[in-house]
Image (cartoon, helix red, strand yellow):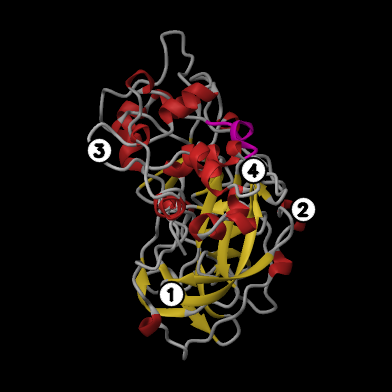
Amino acid sequence: MKNLLLILLPFTILISCKSNQVKKDQQDPNGNGQRPSSTQIISELDSNKDGKLSKSEVKGPIAEDFTTIDRNNDGFLTLEELTKTEKNQGNRPPRQTSTNTNLSNEIDASVKTIPVNTDYFISENIIDGIQKKMVELNGIETLCYIIKTNSQATEHKMGPWCPTHIEDGMEKAGIWFKDDKVYDVSGHFIAKLDEFYSDDKWKLYREDGTIKVTDTKEGCLAAAKPNVEEEYHNYCVECLPEYFKDQETTFVIPVTPKYVKTAQSFGRGGIGIAFNGVKYDPPAPTHAILAAHTIAPLDDHGGHVNPHGGYHYHAVTGSTKEIPQTDVHSPIIGYAIDGFGIYALLDKNGNKPTDLDECGGHSDDKRGYHYHAGEPGGNQIIKCLHGLPGYTEVKE
């Protein structure tokens, strides 16, 4: 698969096939070929001159990603849709490409695997149903499920996150974590952050006791990123789901997982999906968050919101749909991006598994290889992947 970040780049080649020269005003001052604009792409490829592109008029990466760019699903690409893709491409996670490590020789077919069961998903949360598609993953043609959601929880309320006054109780806010422990982000917790982190630069509240919260979308965009804008240092960072309710997340997950001998690290996209369609994410970037003397609490369900992923989980707290097992084993709660099941940590007797590998997984005769979610305070649902990884994309 081509990298979505490069969707528009290869059209320099396509356009050059249709025209033997590039006009001087389409080149930069140094004489280097400039990437064609969305307007130029339509001008060059629109053979019937109707002002939009059909599937028969495009080739290469745009043809491969036609359905992703075609936001209204009308079978045509308009100037507006191409322009939005061009503007948003820097915010998209990388897609699998032919240059990624070829894992053909890493597959261990002796490990038992169980196909993904799509009946477990809450169908109302899936956009246009679950589709199947052949996708190249790390050099291997793989039948995958294509699952599109708005990553909005329905079986529980999203939030709250930040208290608004240092007298607020824990019922008005979410949770935070440190050293594998979970803490309620009450007003008192906010007031004592200087002691909690042994750093007197922490002060997220004003003299009247009100807490500095990013209570607008503009504040969210300025603070919910690695390089927090200086005016939002010493803030409780809160983004609301409604800011990004129209975002669409696409999950590409192998129908039947393939066990890989060498553990795979996470990419920039999601690491899995809960049965309500919400994305499981890699560990929250706490170093960047804390460096700006900010905290970005999770709600009691282990989730919060950011501009480029909407609502997502960093912890499993038992708030989402679970599928009980017929034996003593813990329930399944979702799937990792490689197609292996993710199960709750504790079994019916309250016991943790004792033989988990470096990714948080193990095998048994009934479930094959699968993962167990980590402790809520650990800031990692699973630690790595032992399967051929799929990927996620976010359409903003």
Mark 4 lies on residue: 49
In this view of the protein, which residue sits in the foreground, 287 or 15? 15
Is residue 17 at all visible to an observer of this figure? yes
Q: Identify the element where label 3 is drawn.
A: loop
Which is closer to the viewer, label 3 or label 2?
A: 3
Which is closer to the viewer, label 1 or label 3?
A: 3
Give amino acid for label 3.
Gly
Which is closer to the viewer, label 1 or label 4?
A: 4
Task: Please tell me whether residue 394 is drawn above or below residue 387 in the rendered image.
Answer: above
Residue furthest left in the image: 30
Q: Residue at x 53, y 31 (%)?
A: 239
Which is closer to the viewer, label 2 or label 1?
A: 2
Mark 1 lies on residue: 354
Distance in Å between CA atoms under marks 2 and 1? 37 Å
Distance in Å between CA atoms under marks 4 and 3? 30 Å
Q: Residue at x 58, y 48 (%)?
A: 69
| Lower sequence index among marks 1 and 3 | 3
Task: Please tell me whether residue 347 is drawn above or below residue 39 in the rendered image.
Answer: below
Q: How many marks?
A: 4
Q: Is residue 141 magenta?
A: no
